[in-house]
Image (spheres, coloured by chain):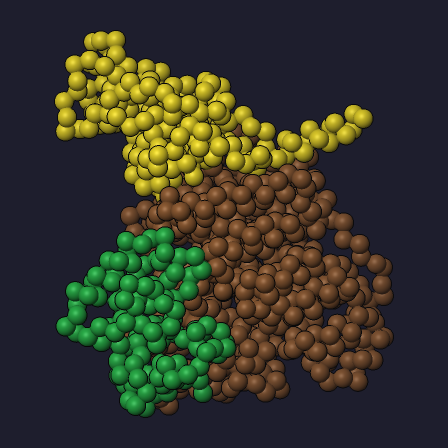
Chain colours: A brown, B green, C yellow
């Protein structure tokens, strides 16, 4: 993993001091709330319904055990004992006091963590495949490039006051676990026919009020030209993105207005004028960053673990966990372990301080001190020996973290919604809890198979409802919480935007409607089809009829 | 009836106007009847004039919950007055009592019939 | 006349100091004064700039709004003393790009001045993008401005200023280590 050096650390200290100064000036009345708000947002601090919320960056979703323990400590010391994993691989705390925020930033900086650019109209934390460095599918390690972008985008002097927020995601694998096609910029690492490394560059995807699957504007950008090309994209956006209407200010609107071809042409024109020798990162620095990720001390192990096979045969719960939460690793004898934060009845994505400590211990002891956060609001132990899986499973089970439901119907993405968020129109969490309870039977959940439900409490779509197999959007209908269902979205490599099923439903009708959708799917399913496959084959109508016929 | 609410600058806590001060509990909020429009405006203005104390003061509408007391009309304001509905021991609701019960049972904004009360957990 | 802060040296040394503001900002509705240095809007400059520059010895600056492109000035830059880049709101970041283009692409060596909603929070970004004069509207003193502009000991990306970026510092440290 990348280790911060003295430069990175001094930078965080300076940032923390700057924010302390700004908070002091705000409390003294030297900064108005209007002036202070963008400043606190660029340090991840929102004023929500009940308190301030602090969003801490987890660059490319990667943590070591010391960092995870510090997050647990912050949850205990400054919050009410829990944190919430976000759909951009960050963690947010719900009960923060403004007066404590500078101390928290200091405490984070001590373990090389920060909240820089986790909000605001700037380049946000870059997200990446949570299986990076562990999956065999990988063409190149996306963490290397995410770290390159982290440094380049941090307090970028030209691009810190963009028309709107700007989110970049990277995958090095063909299976897309980073939702790259619905980001402002999505980068897919690819090798050209001659073997040279490059990126497919997708620009102008996004969710929110006007969802788009982003178009590819460059099929093969030489990897070493990444930063100069990003500079060109950002410059075209900074100059020409709309600033007159907050809802039309994202780059997707510019790309759609110009057309991908014309937008790409403008980027090429700008790129040609940039001095690449200055803008791009030198080979030496790139090699230093690459080296930091290359030194994972894997052991040479047999591909099959007799201990694991025997334990699995003896324990149905371990067998279920292995079927759903254990994924193939590139090294023989290792596995990727997903830790679900979606236990039935729990708040999706929440982890208590004690749970964070448990996972930190497991990461340190069993996963080469490496822990990941996924955009689906779960955790990953990326490098677990097969031999250790029984012990890891037992420890997770004891902590209430062994729910075997990854990508199943109860693995629901939900934003904090109106329980916490000042922007929300309706709650998301209780809806997720209702659905999880409805599908609490794990056998039934496995029978249904992969089914991604995602819930947003408002049109900003933090809960990714547009790209859900079944998406749920909370709306305020005449002073009541109602929920609009959509079907057929996907945030993965087969990305698509879901279609609205019909009129919004009252809260208590959502879980029964999902039940109806599932029954309709199971009746129509052919072979091994997922819900999404069946939907794509039979279309919206049968589902619509089933839900609204029953509802009448 | 109306009350005036805001968030406190230093910690973000939900607060309510009470005769020249900002208090934590909805139960302690000063209540204004419909004839007291000017006093509501004065409370909001007092909040705006104290930008180092509170952020974004605004009036909220209240309704009577039969036999229990008063509660904010909008479910957003009920959640602000209580705390999150997924963690019933967090926020103002942790103290319990009659005021919390009244807000939890409020469904004043509900206009359709036969739907579950969204504030009360099933 | 708004108070003006300028960087001390032409090479971009980052200590700031009060400077005399000799330029009058002429809004489009007003007549151009008979004498003295003036800053005009882009439209006004394009209409009247030639006559003004050739008829007398005063200096002329141009005010560029965020939606206006500095490319429009490309051929005039050698005779323009000040390019004033406007921040109608401090959240409008287009002027940062304008400043960089003036310095990096057009090699403009005159004064690049930040006007409008100019706060000390922006000092570091502005200096890095090539601004060398500022009309702060938050009451910032040169001392506060200098402090704000130099708050960060390290920078990560190349810009207009000559600061070594983190990668340069690391390469230097490594070279030193190698030499021992």
Q: Is residue A340 visible?
A: yes
Q: Residue at x 64, y 50 (%)?
A: A110
Query: Is residue A351 positioned above or below A44 on the image?
Result: below
Query: Is residue A128 positioned above or below C4 on the image?
Result: below
Q: Residue at x 43, y 39 (%)?
A: C121
The picture places residue C36, in percent across and down from the top left corner, at 23, 14
Q: Residue at x 78, y 25 (%)?
A: C179
Q: Residue at x 60, y 53 (%)?
A: A108
Q: Is residue A513 visible?
A: no
The picture places residue A374, in percent across and down from the top left corner, at 59, 63
The quarter in which the C terminus of chain A is drawn is bottom left
The picture places residue A186, in percent across and down from the top left corner, at 51, 52
The picture places residue A538, in percent across and down from the top left corner, at 44, 78
Q: Is residue A395 left or right of residue C105?
A: right
Place residue A401 in its image quadrant. bottom right
Q: Is residue C162 left or right of residue A122?
A: right
Viewer-proximal residue, C64 or C25?
A: C25
Query: Is residue C76 positioned above or below A293 on the image?
Result: above
Viewer-proximal residue, A188 or C14?
A: C14
């Amino acid at each position: 993993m990348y280790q911060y050096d003295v430069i990175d650390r001094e930078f965080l200290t300076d940032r923390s001091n700057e924010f302390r100064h700004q908070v002091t000036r705000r409390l003294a009345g030297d900064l108005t709330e209007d002036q202070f708000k963008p400043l606190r947002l660029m340090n991840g601090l929102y004023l929500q319904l009940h308190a301030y919320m602090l969003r801490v960056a987890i660059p490319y979703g990667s943590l070591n055990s010391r960092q995870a323990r510090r997050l647990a400590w912050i949850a205990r010391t400054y919050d009410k004992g829990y944190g919430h994993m976000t759909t951009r691989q960050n963690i947010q705390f719900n009960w923060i006091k403004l007066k404590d925020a500078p101390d928290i930033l200091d405490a984070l900086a001590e373990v090389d963590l920060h909240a820089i650019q986790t909000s605001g109209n700037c380049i946000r934390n870059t997200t990446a495949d949570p299986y990076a460095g562990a999956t065999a599918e990988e063409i190149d390690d996306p963490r290397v490039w995410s770290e390159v972008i982290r440094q380049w985008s941090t307090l970028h002097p030209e691009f810190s006051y963009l028309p709107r927020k700007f989110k970049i995601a990277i995958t090095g694998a063909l299976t897309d676990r980073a939702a790259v096609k619905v980001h402002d910029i999505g980068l897919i690492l690819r090798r050209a026919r001659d073997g040279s490394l490059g990126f497919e560059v997708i620009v102008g995807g996004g969710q929110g009020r006007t969802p788009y699957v982003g178009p590819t504007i460059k099929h093969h950008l030489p990897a070493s030209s990444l930063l100069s090309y990003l500079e060109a994209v950002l410059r075209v956006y900074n100059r020409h993105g709309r600033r007159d209407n907050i809802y039309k200010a994202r780059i997707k609107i510019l790309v759609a207005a110009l057309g991908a071809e014309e937008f790409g042409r403008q980027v090429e024109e700008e790129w040609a004028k940039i001095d690449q020798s200055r803008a791009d990162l030198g080979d030496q620095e790139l090699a230093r960053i690459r080296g930091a990720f290359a030194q994972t001390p894997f052991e040479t192990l047999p591909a099959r673990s007799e201990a694991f096979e025997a334990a699995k045969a003896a324990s149905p719960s371990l067998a279920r966990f292995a079927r759903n939460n254990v994924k193939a690793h590139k090294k023989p004898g290792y596995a990727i372990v997903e830790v679900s934060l979606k236990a039935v009845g729990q708040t999706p994505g929440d982890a208590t301080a004690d749970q964070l400590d448990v996972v930190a211990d497991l990461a340190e002891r069993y996963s080469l001190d490496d822990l990941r956060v996924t955009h689906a609001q779960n955790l990953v132990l990326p490098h677990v020996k097969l031999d250790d899986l029984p012990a890891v499973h037992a420890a997770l089970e004891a902590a209430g973290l062994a729910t075997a439901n990854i990508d199943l119907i109860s693995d629901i993405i939900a934003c904090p919604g109106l329980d916490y968020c000042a922007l929300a129109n309706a709650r998301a969490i209780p809806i997720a809890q209702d659905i999880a309870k409805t599908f609490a039977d794990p056998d039934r959940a496995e029978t249904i198979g992969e089914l991604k439900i995602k819930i947003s409490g408002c049109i900003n779509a933090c809960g990714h409802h547009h790209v859900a197999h079944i998406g749920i959007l909370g709306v305020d209908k005449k002073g009541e919480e109602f929920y609009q269902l959509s079907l057929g979205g996907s945030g993965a490599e087969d990305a698509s935007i879901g279609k609205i099923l019909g009129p919004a439903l009252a809260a208590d009708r959502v879980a029964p409607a999902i039940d109806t959708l599932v029954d309709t799917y199971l009746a129509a399913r052919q072979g091994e089809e997922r819900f999404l496959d069946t939907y794509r084959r039979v279309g919206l109508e049968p589902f619509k009829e089933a839900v609204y016929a029953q509802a009448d | 009836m109306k009350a005036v609410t805001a968030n406190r600058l230093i910690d973000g806590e939900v607060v309510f106007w009470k005769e020249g001060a900002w208090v934590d509990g909805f139960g302690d909020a000063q209540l204004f009847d419909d004839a007291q429009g000017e006093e509501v405006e004065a409370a909001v203005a007092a909040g705006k004039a104290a930008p180092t104390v509170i952020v974004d003061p605004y009036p909220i509408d209240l309704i009577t919950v039969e036999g229990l007391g008063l509660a904010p009309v909008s479910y957003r304001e009920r959640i602000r007055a209580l705390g999150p509905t997924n963690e019933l021991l967090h926020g103002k609701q942790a103290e319990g009592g009659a005021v919390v019960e009244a807000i939890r049972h409020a469904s004043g904004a509900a206009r359709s019939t036969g739907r579950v009360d969204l504030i009360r957990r099933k | 006349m708004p108070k003006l802060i300028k960087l001390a040296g032409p090479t971009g040394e980052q200590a700031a100091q009060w400077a005399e503001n000799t330029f009058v900002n002429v809004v489009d509705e007003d007549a151009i004064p008979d004498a003295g240095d003036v800053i005009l809007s882009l439209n006004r400059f394009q209409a009247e700039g030639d006559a003004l520059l050739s008829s007398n010895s005063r200096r002329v600056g141009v005010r560029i709004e965020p939606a206006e492109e500095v490319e429009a000035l490309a051929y005039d830059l050698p005779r323009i003393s000040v390019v004033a880049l406007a921040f109608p709101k401090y959240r409008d970041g287009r002027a940062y790009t304008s400043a960089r283009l003036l310095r990096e692409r057009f090699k403009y060596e005159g004064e690049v001045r930040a006007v409008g909603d100019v706060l000390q929070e922006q000092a570091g970004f502005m200096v890095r993008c090539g601004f060398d004069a500022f009309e702060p509207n938050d009451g910032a003193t040169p001392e506060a401005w200098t402090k704000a502009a130099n708050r960060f000991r390290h920078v990560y990306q190349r810009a207009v200023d000559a600061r070594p970026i983190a990668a340069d510092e690391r390469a230097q440290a490594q070279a030193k280590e190698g030499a021992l």
